[in-house]
Image (tube, helix red, strand yellow):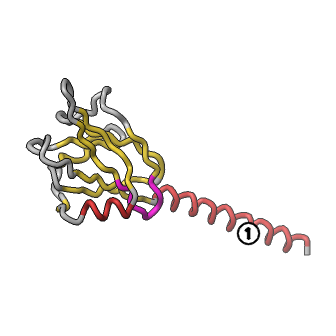
Amino acid sequence: MKKLLLMLSVALLSTSLNLSAQDSETSQEQTGTICFIRSTGFAGSASAFKTFIDEEFVCKLNNKKYSFHEVSVGLHSCSVQFGGKKSKEKAEKFEVDVKPGEITYVQLVFETGVLINNVYCEEVTENTAKNKMEGLKEDTKCL
């Protein structure tokens, strides 16, 4: 009887460890999406903005376009700049928390000034994003 109980205990422990390992692998494989939206009006519309996720170049986005990028779940740093395919240190970084199976919407903002122009990212709600995206086209070949 003791042997049977010991064997059952070992079997339950082994099954529990296997399930735990599978759960861990599944959570590491989960992804979400970051959507960059560019509708910056006439100013600055002649050139494409370069977008980055975790300092990796992901898209050259023209005006009146949006693009989707699948990423792992968790915190990611987004940035945008006027030129170059390497993230510049001076580029303003914006952190987003990507949830499993969800889309995080990031709007590209272009500010004009007397002496300098600035471009940066800001997160927007799904409702705001969908309203902005109505007149835009998806860019599926943005590299």
**Residue 101 on image: x %, y %:** 43, 64
Location of residue 141 (image quadrant): bottom left
Q: Which sits in the foreground, 70 or 95?
A: 95
Q: Which span of residues is magenta-colored?
A: 98-105
**Residue 69 on image: x %, y %:** 30, 55
Q: Is residue 143 left or right of residue 55?
A: left
Location of residue 126 (image quadrant): bottom left
Point out the residue furthest to the left here: 46
Is residue 103 rendered magenta in the image?
yes
Mark 1, residues whose alpha carbon is within 10 Å: few (<14), some, or many (≥20)? few
**Residue 139 on image: x %, y %:** 18, 58
Is residue 81 rendered magenta in the image?
no
Label count reads: 1
Give the answer, above or below, for where 88 lies relative to 74. Answer: above
Residue beneath the point at 16% across and 49% down = 41
Residue beneath the point at 28% across and 29% down = 88
Point out the residue furthest to the front here: 114
Give the answer, above or below, for where 80 lies relative to 131. Answer: above
Residue beneath the point at 32% across and 43% down = 121
Give the answer, above or below, for where 98 lies relative to 9. Answer: above
- What element does badge 1 sit on? helix
Q: Is residue 95 left or right of residue 143?
A: right
Point out the residue furthest to the top here: 115
Quarter of the image where the N terminus is located: bottom right
Q: Is residue 100 left or right of residue 80?
A: right
Residue pointed to by mark 1: 11
Q: What's under tag 1, amino acid-wise?
A: Ala
Residue beneath the point at 20% across and 61% down = 138
